[in-house]
Image: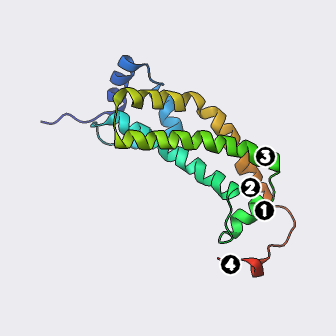
């Protein structure tokens, strides 16, 4: 009879050996409890974390690199100062570094590097989150401002 997979138990075994973040903290931020299989557990956790990194990057890209095809990005991007965009570019560079590091680990898996990745991202996550909250709040507020959206200038 096959033993039922318990993610938290398996994670805690790895945690004892490798000094990883608390399961509940990691799950709260990256929803790792949706992982269903034991093989390559660290790799799957890193991939879940990378999914969130990619999501944050797409948010920043919409503001930093708007296209005429997206009236939303054009509208929201107008509400950020050059100084705010410079800060966003710095965070974007950091997030892209980790996204590419994750890509490298997909190409060439390494358990020690997976652990380093998980710990580094988790350690820095609150800083990233605070900045993304500021950006998303400003994006949301841009829609309360009284201004017209020139749909005739929209080429999407």
Assess whether mark 2 and mark 4 are in contact (beta carbons under 8 angstroms).
Answer: no
- Label 2 environment density (alpha carbons within 10 Å; few <14, some 14–19, many ≥20): many
Report helix, strand or loop for mark 4: loop
Residue 84's disc is 3
Q: CA distance from mark 4 to mark 2?
A: 21 Å
Q: Nearer the viewer, mark 1 or mark 4?
A: 4
Residue situated furthest left in the rendering: 1
Q: Viewed as shown, does residue 11 lie left or right of 117?
A: left
Q: Is residue 82 placed above or below 43 in the rendered structure?
A: below
Q: Residue at x 38, y 26 (%)?
A: 112
Q: Which residue is mark 1?
A: 143
Residue 35: x, y in percent? Answer: 36, 42
Q: CA distance from mark 2 to mark 1?
A: 7 Å
Q: Nearer the viewer, mark 4 or mark 2?
A: 4
Q: Residue at x 40, y 43 (%)?
A: 34
Q: Which residue is mark 2?
A: 139
Q: Is residue 105 visible?
A: yes
Q: CA distance from mark 3 to mark 4?
A: 27 Å
């Amino acid at each position: 009879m096959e033993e039922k997979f318990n993610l938290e138990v398996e994670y805690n075994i790895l945690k004892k050996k490798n000094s990883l973040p608390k399961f509940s903290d990691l799950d709260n931020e990256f929803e790792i409890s949706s992982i269903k299989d034991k093989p390559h557990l660290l790799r799957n956790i890193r991939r879940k974390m990378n999914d969130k990194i990619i999501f944050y990057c797409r948010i920043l890209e919409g503001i930093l690199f708007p296209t005429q095809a997206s009236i939303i990005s054009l509208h929201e991007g107008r509400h950020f100062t050059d100084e705010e965009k410079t800060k966003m570019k710095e965070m974007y560079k950091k997030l892209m570094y980790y996204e590419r590091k994750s890509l490298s680990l997909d190409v060439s898996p390494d358990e020690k590097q997976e652990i380093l990745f998980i710990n580094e991202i988790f350690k820095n996550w609150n800083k990233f989150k605070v900045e993304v909250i500021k950006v998303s709040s400003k994006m949301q507020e841009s829609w309360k401002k009284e201004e017209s959206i020139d749909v005739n200038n929209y080429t999407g």
